[in-house]
Amino acid sequence: MKTRVARLAGSVAFAFLACARSEAAPSTSAPVVATASATASEPASTSASTTTPSASTSTSVPAPLPPHMLLVPAGSFTMGTDTGGEGDEHPAHTVTLAAFWLDKTEVTNGAWDECVAAGACRPKSASVRAEHPDFNGPNQPVSGVSWDDARGYCAWRGRRLPREAEFEKAARGTDDRRYAWGNDPPTRDRAVFSAGRTEDVGTHPSGRGPYGHDDLAGNVWEWMEDEYDPYAYRRSGAPEGVPGACAEIMAAQDELRRDYEQGFTGTNPIPTECEHAIRGGAYNYDPHGLRVTNRVHHPGKYRIPMLGVRCAKDAPRSP
């Protein structure tokens, strides 16, 4: 079961989330890493050399990875679960995705402030900044940003928000692991959870996902592009990880309320609007809720201390 309590202070909503949800096992996939120098505000991933095919063997050259991003390869994986978790995590089903790049870490305060300085982003919530001064380090994950804020930041970087299915694949890989690092339970060297504050991104390497991404569990929740659909896994678009349209989502939520299915999405009230999916858990989260199949949602206007962002980008199709 998951529990979330939302508190509104002025115009800022502070939500304290707690969950518990579903299944997964370890991968041997080696991450493909961007070869780019780091900035102080956006930590770089470890560089990996790539081999460019000679003209005698190939006429195509692999596209260079964007800075600070890692490749999640094209292919199929199992999304969701048949046992455990909440009703919105069922059933387990095969999803096939194109290749995409995903930021190696959550967006940092330092990286966000570059966007603010350029006049392209509004600052993080003033209330979050003032009431949580120990969240403001340049290499800590930015939080106190709305869905629109997060989407605008990613667009400014030439990227986009990840889809819910993309995030789960990046965290789960193709071996059905329960947590991003494998099947072993969460520990403090793997993730930031059950704590009072965030920590610098990328400082828990033993918790990396199957493709090398950091902090896919804990630290801060991350906004997804998708609207949250409690029946997403039953839809015709499920094999592509596509949720229903807002009207279908509203009908599903109305049905859950009518049938007294409160626990279907956890103990938090069933939404009365089309909210956005968030993934990954946060610093104040219960360890059992860090599993890769866990699904949570919030209104897009929320600017709360435990909710941040990571960006994605389409990868070129192979010739």
Image (cartoon, helix red, strand yellow):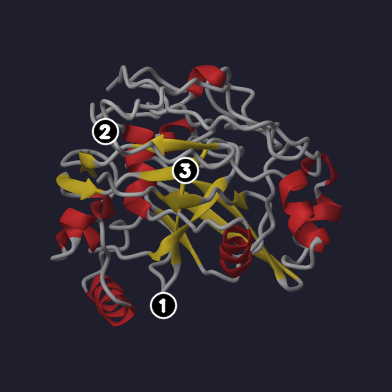
For marks 1 and 3, the one nearer the N-term is 3
Residue 255 in sight from this viewpoint: yes
> Residue lying farthest front?
56
Q: How far apart are marks 3 and 2 (CA)?
A: 23 Å
Q: Which residue is drawn at 23% across and 44% down?
A: 79
Label 1: which residue? 272
Which quadrant would residue 94 be assigned to in this image? top left
Disc 3 vs disc 2: which is toward the camera? 3
- In front here: 259 or 209? 209
Which quadrant would residue 168 be assigned to in this image? top left
Pointers 1 and 3 in contact (CB under 8 A)?
no
Disc 2 vs disc 1: which is toward the camera? 2
- In front here: 161 or 253? 161
Q: Measured from the top left, where is residue 206 in percent x and y?
A: 51, 17
State whether residue 176 is above or below residue 29.
Answer: below
Q: Which residue is drawn at 26% across and 71% down?
A: 244
Residue 294 in sight from this viewpoint: no
Amino acid type, mark 1: Thr
* Label 1, residues with CA under 10 Å away: few <14, some 14-19, many ≥20: few
The tag on residue 23 is 2
Q: Measured from the top left, where is residue 147 in percent x and y?
A: 56, 65
Q: How far apart are marks 1 and 3 (CA)?
A: 31 Å
Label 3: which residue? 102
